[in-house]
Structures are given as C-alpha cells and as structure tokens.
Image (spheres, rainbow, N blue to C red):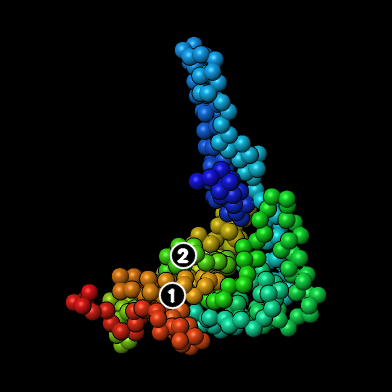
Amino acid sequence: MSARTLETQVSRLLSSPMAEVRDLGQSCAKLHRAGVERECASRSFVCRQARRRAGRRAAALFTREVRTAPTLVKYAEANSYAMQTQAELTQAAAELLAAEPIAPAPVVDLVERTETLEVELAATMVYSASHHPYRQIRDLVAALPETRVNEIIELGLRHRGRHDEALRAFHAGAALRFDILMDIGGFRDMHRHRRCVQIIQGFTALHGCEIPDSGDLPADVHLLAEAGVLAEFEAALAAAHSASAQLASRDWPAASRAPEAAQSALYLLPLATRIRSLFKMDFAEAQYISELRSGPAGHFSYRRVAWEMFKALERQHPALARHIRVTDFTQPIDLLKR
C-alpha cells in the first residue's frame, strides 16, 4: 500500500460518523507514527555502524535519506470537506424530498440515461444523502430549474480543499446504472466488486427486511415455513428493529447518555435489513457480475440480484444480453449436473 493510499484510508476512518470507526482511524495513525519513530531509531543505529566499519563514501550510501511517508502524519486527519459536504447534502436532500414519500421500486432497476450530465451529478449527490430510489430522485431533479441543479452541484464542491478529491458522486457518465435494493448480508458480497462506482445510502429500517422464501428452490417451497421457524424469524427481526428505533429516539435511559445514539442504533439492524445502493458500470462489468454472482455456488440472495441485473439488461439491450452466460435463477440447481 502506498503512503497516499494509507493516508486516504486513515482520513476516511477519522471522518466517519461512527465513534468506533474513528477510534480505529486513531489507532492506525498511532501505528504509523510508531513505525516512523522505529525507522528513525533504526537509521540512527545503521548510521553509527556504517561510520565505524566503512569509509565515508560507503557511509553516505547506506545512510542516504529515504522518504517513506513524509506527509502521512501531517495530512492523515479527519476530512472536513467530506464531513461538511455530507451534512449540507443531507439537509438539502431532506428539504427537496420532504413531500415525496419513498416510491416503490424493484429489487434491481436499470435506470436508462435520459438526463444531462449535470442532472446525473445532482441526482447522485441527493441519492447519497437520502433513502429514495434513484429513478425517483433523477426525475425530480430533472424537473428542477437549471439554477437549482447547479446549486446542488455547488454543494458538492463548496468546501473542497486543495488536496481533496471530489466526492465519489462526481464519477459520473457510466452507461449502466443499477439501483439495487437488497439485504445487508448479500450486499456485503456485492460490495466487493470494485470495477464500478458504488453510491451507498445509509443503513435504515425504512425498507424493511428480506424474508427468505423459496431461495433458489421451486417456487412452491417456503424455506422458513417448512422448517417451522418463520414466525420466530419475523419476531426476531421486529424486535431488533424496535430496539434500534428505541435507542435512536433515546427512549432508553442508557441512550440519553450516548452522544451518538442514532449511529449506535444502526448496529442493532439485522443483516436481513434491506439497503439501497447505486452501481454505475460499463457493459463488461455488468456481464462479469451477472455471470459470477448468478452461479449455483453463490447465495440465493445475490444470485437473485445478479439474475435481475441480467433481466434488466435483456429488456433494454437484448442483442448484448444474449452474450452473457448467466445461470437461470428461476430454475432449481441440478447438483448432479454440477
């Protein structure tokens, strides 16, 4: 890992709204400072030995200055640009969407490109600070006056410092945009695909939970019902969401003393809770994800998402989709064939 990459990651940790993550960032910074101090001590020792055992020219060679990470300690700090911008975007999104209930949306929505680049940028920034579907936000932003669209874009750059990269939302222009609503557990695997731009909304209980039914078995099979644990499973989810809501609202005595109760409450959300994310990519990545994640060895949660990505592509780009070697999620897995 390069010093610049390490610096960026430490800065991201220190900028997190979660206290636990910020503590991890502090630990990483301390580890680096300890490494730098140890390196300085080692170089001092080598310098003394070189002067004792070698000539002046050899000593100069062995003890020449090597800059490993000269700026890391100086710049690895919380990113005020990201923190201030996120706060302002959250407020702007709340005002813009105040009268807009969250629209129903499919598991996977391949949002066709009908808007300008400016509208895409503004819509993506609003999306990152809300819980609404991308199509709903895109259509709403597209209907705004041009000056208002530019104001939203300006929010994303107003606090940008000299060394700050622009927000991830500015990685715009990808041909394919998949708005995905799936369980957190399955998303943790989808999140591993890095050859694309991911805009991930915050954790919330607003979208409910994913209840496993048939999985990748025949449609008339209900996994939890046949196992006799469906009611217990649903009760456990409801209890967890209720506890999370209580902690976030400070209804518990202990919550009144927690400075970040709303953030801490998110830890109580089960992995079956749904999360929304926007994946922007080219055709090659869509082909790769559809083929890999629909395979019979995968979990039925993300197998379903990969299959829906393929079906969305098939509807909009049938000539291209026929080249994707997808595994049909609607068909039972033939273990003998495997």
Query: Which callout, 2 or 1, points at the residue further toward the start of the chain?
Result: 2
Question: Residue 194 versus residue 54: which sits nearer the camera?
Answer: 54
Q: Which residue is mark 2?
A: 193
Pick out the residue farthest to the top.
52
Pick out the residue farthest to the left.
336
Which mark lies nearer to you, 2 or 1? 1
**For residue 165, above or below residue 242:** above
Where, quadrant-wise, is the C terminus in this rendering? bottom left
Residue 156: give its label.
none
Residue drawn at (65%, 48%) of the image: 78
Query: Rounded to the nearest whole Å, what is the CA distance between mark 2 and mark 1?
Result: 12 Å
Residue type, label 2: His
Question: Residue 233 versus residue 192: which sits nearer the camera?
Answer: 192
Question: Residue 236 versus residue 36: which sits nearer the camera?
Answer: 36
Horizontal and vertical percent position of residue 142: 71, 81
Pick out the residue farthest to the front.
57
The quarter of the picture where residue 68 lies is: top right
Horizontal and vertical percent position of residue 88: 73, 63
At label 2, counting other C-alpha atoms closer than 10 Å, the crowd grade (few under 14, some 14-19, many 20 or more) is: some
Residue type, label 1: Gln
Residue drawn at (61%, 55%) of the image: 17
Secondary structure under tag 1 reads helix
Residue 287: give its label.
1
Q: Is residue 21 visible?
A: yes
Residue drawn at (59%, 78%) of the image: 133
**For residue 281, above or below residue 307:** above
Q: Is residue 232 visible?
A: no
At label 1, counting other C-alpha atoms closer than 10 Å, the crowd grade (few under 14, some 14-19, many 20 or more) is: many
Q: Is residue 95 left or right of residue 264?
A: right
